[in-house]
Image (cartoon, rainbow, N blue to C red):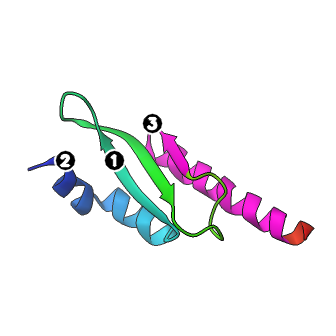
Amino acid sequence: MTGTSRNVEDPTLVRLRADFPGHRIWRSIRYDGRLGDWVATLHDPAEGVDATVIRDNPEALRGALEGQRAQVKKRSRAR
């Protein structure tokens, strides 16, 4: 099984992708072929601020993406 096919089947990735549809969420592949960091690339500016968010684990990525949403909401209210 390749790293890419593991990414598609991982239930944690499925949940993150469902919860944050404005981002493309995936796992990086390390130099040795094993899965690495958790990555979110912004596709909808209404969902985040930073173009790319990288964290060591899914919980940290979820927290960072929730923070991104909060920043967008705060910025929208300030206008």
Residue annotated with mark 2? 3
Left or right for 11, reference 68: left
In percent of width and height, residue 57 lies at 44, 41
Q: Farthest residue in the right direction? A: 78
The circle drawn on residue 56 is 3
Within 10 angstroms of label 2, few (less than 14), some, or many (20 or more) residues?
some
Compared with 30, 47 (above or below) is: below
Q: Taking 59 as reference, is 1 left or right?
A: left
Q: Position of residue 28 (x, y in %)?
A: 33, 42
| Earlier residue among tags 2 and 1 | 2
**Distance between mark 1 and mark 3 Cα atoms:** 10 Å
Q: For the residue labelled by badge 3, is the local secondary structure a helix, a strand or a loop?
A: loop
79 relative position to 33: left or right: right
Q: Are marks 2 and 1 in contact (CB under 8 Å)?
A: yes
Name the secondary structure under disc 2.
helix
Kindly identify the residue that appears in the image at 51 percent across and 66 percent down: 43
Residue at 75% from the left image edge and 58% from the top image edge: 71
The answer to whether mark 1 and mark 3 are in CB contact below 8 A is no
In percent of width and height, residue 50 lies at 62, 51
The residue type indicated by label 3 comes to: Asp
Q: Is residue 11 above or below residue 46?
A: above
Q: Which mark is residue 27?
A: 1
Magenta segment: 52-76
